[in-house]
Amino acid sequence: MVPDQDKQSLPLPPDGAPDLECAICFSQFNNVFRTPKMLQCKHTFCLECLARMNIKSSEPDAIQCPLCRGVTPLPDLGLPKLENNPTILSYLPEAMQRVYSVRFNRSRGKLQVKRPCTVSNSLDVGLPTPPCASSNQAPWRRRVQELLNKPVCRTLIKVLVSLLMVLLICVLIYLLRPQE
Ligand SMILES: [Zn+2]
Ligand SMILES: [Zn+2]
């Protein structure tokens, strides 16, 4: 094992072993959320960092490499289906050789392990910013909301409700009057 200070100063340790840390988050790769994922430009980052980048990106179907700006289109089945870096994987400890199947739920901003395991089952990686915050609200509801926000309308509604109450009370008094 290479001491930590050597790993930071040299991208490749003298024995030719690959860098086992993600260049974005400086965390060691693992077999769950930090699986080493290789882009088409052969640069490797952890799945978690790629997921975070993808969520913030305006181009959800592709990943732009932060090192060389090369664009990698995402596989149809999503981010976790990007190719693992086999060299880095082979340098991981024995117990991490089996890579967990991870699902990426972009709309909910979650990475989830498909089968329960000893590590935490899901990881929040942030939420995508919706193109328009109120676009998923029904138009009439937005109109009503806008109307209600106007002070004039609010006063008008209050007056109407008061009048209705008075009318209702009058009707009740009329109905409950002593019969002759
Ligand atoms: Zn990372
Ligand atoms: Zn690259």
Image (tube, rainbow, N blue to C red):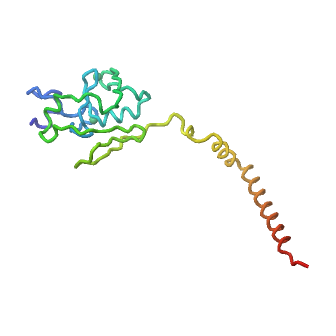
Please say if 142 is above or below 14.
below
Q: How many marks?
A: 0
- Could you say where residue 111 lies in the image, as x and y percent from the top left? 33, 41
- In the image, residue 149 sits, relative to residue 170, either above or below, namely above
Q: Outermost residue toward the front?
A: 180
Q: Quadrant of residue 98?
A: top left
Identify the residue shown where x is 68% and y is 49%: 148
Residue 71: x percent and y percent? 35, 21
Q: Quadrant of ligand 2?
A: top left
Q: Quadrant of the C terminus?
A: bottom right
Q: Position of residue 152 (x, y in %)?
A: 74, 49
Of residues 115 and 17, the one nearer the viewer is 115
Is 84 located above or below residue 122 in the figure?
Answer: above
Task: Residue lying at the far right in this picture: please name it.
Answer: 180
Indicate left or right for 154 with 133 as reference: right
Residue drawn at x 74%, y 57% is 158
Q: Quadrant of the N terminus?
A: top left
- State the image quarter where residue 108 is shown: top left
Residue 20 horizontal/vertical position (percent): 18, 33
Residue 69, quarter of the rendered image: top left
Tell whether 103 sits left or right of 119: right
Q: In the visual, does 35 lie left or right of 151?
A: left
